[in-house]
Amino acid sequence: MNDRVQMTMDDQGIAEVCLNRPDKLNALDGAMFDALNAVLAQLQQAPRLRCVLLHSAGKAFCAGLDMASFAAMAGGPGAAFGDLGRRTHGIANAPQHIAWGWRALPVPVIAAVQGVAYGGGLQLALGADLRLLAPDARLALMEIQWGIVPDMAGMVLARGLLRDDVLRELTYSGRVVAAEEAVALGLGTRLCNDPLAEARLLAAQIAQRSPAAVRAAKRLLNQAARSLDDSAAELLQAESDEQAALIGAPQQAEAVRARMEKRAPRFED
């Protein structure tokens, strides 16, 4: 871990993981990816773990990739993220694991979301079992605006929450969804005036239940959520393959330039 992420655990076995880059709206960079994966590795081995709270410092949950990461994409996927096709964390690569890893933990994970959760930030929240949203929360699968696709396990995680046509609309358009609509669509569990306080109350309730039963319930729910035609491993690999072909290509580079220059993109087939 580093200064990007803080973790504490109380005597009930409730761990709190806090993204701590509020001056950058908790945007994701290499150090944030490394810190989150380090936290996940520690939690996998933590004795007496009962529940995890995932939240962020400041006014935003996570604004997605930071500008430096988008700029690095000009050099291709290897320059920005290394070999996306390489499975470094079980069935996932390192960027996918910061979202998929929460689903792979043996205990419930509750995300408390305020402000923006865009792109990779939304995919990070989707890895949690539950998402409690503040009234000011704004969610978006925003990757299309940068000429890329959701590839941090977003396709695997969102397909069990959203209708197929809704997932397609949000993926193709990149539009921002307000908190109330997000709950109605299935991206959020419920609205809360103080999602972190509500998450702490819920975690305390879960911590009082039989640990064996809670873990068994999560195993069964994870199994029930698996697609009948595409395994999670196959879809995670497909995410990586599609993204690697997009990053650094002419159209993706133009999408980034247009966003940074605040103009309409000019794509050539």
Image (cartoon, grey):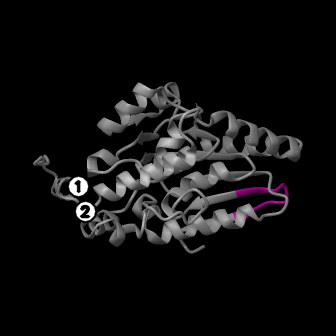
Quadrant position of residue 197? top right
The secondary structure type at the circle numbered 1 is: helix
Residue at coordinates 42% horizontally, 64% vertically from top-left? 23
Q: Which residue is mark 1?
A: 252
- Say whether marks 1 and 2 touch (CB < 8 Å): yes
Q: CA distance from mark 1 to mark 2?
A: 6 Å
Which circle marks residue 248 in the picture? 2
Q: Is residue 81 magenta?
A: no
| Mark sitting on residue 240 | none
Task: Find residue 147 and report its horizontal and vertical position in percent.
Answer: 26, 50
Question: Which x, y percent locates residue 79?
Answer: 33, 72
For label 1, the crowd category at 10 Å Cα-Cα, with few meaning under 14, some 14 to 19 and many 20 or more, is many
For badge 1, the amino acid type reads Gln
Picture coordinates of residue 134, whole percent (x, y): 53, 39
Q: Residue at x 58, y 36 (%)?
A: 193
The residue closer to the viewer here, 135 or 261, is 261
Give the camera-side residue of 143 and 114.
143
- Residue 105 shows in this picture: yes
Residue extent of the magenta highlight: 8-15
Q: Nearer the viewer, residue 80 or 226?
A: 226
Quadrant containing the N terminus in the rendered view = bottom right
Q: Is residue 224 above or below residue 21?
A: above
Residue 241 rendering spot, x and y as whole percentages: 39, 55
Task: Residue type at mark 2: give it.
Answer: Gly
Nearer the observer, 229 or 6: 229
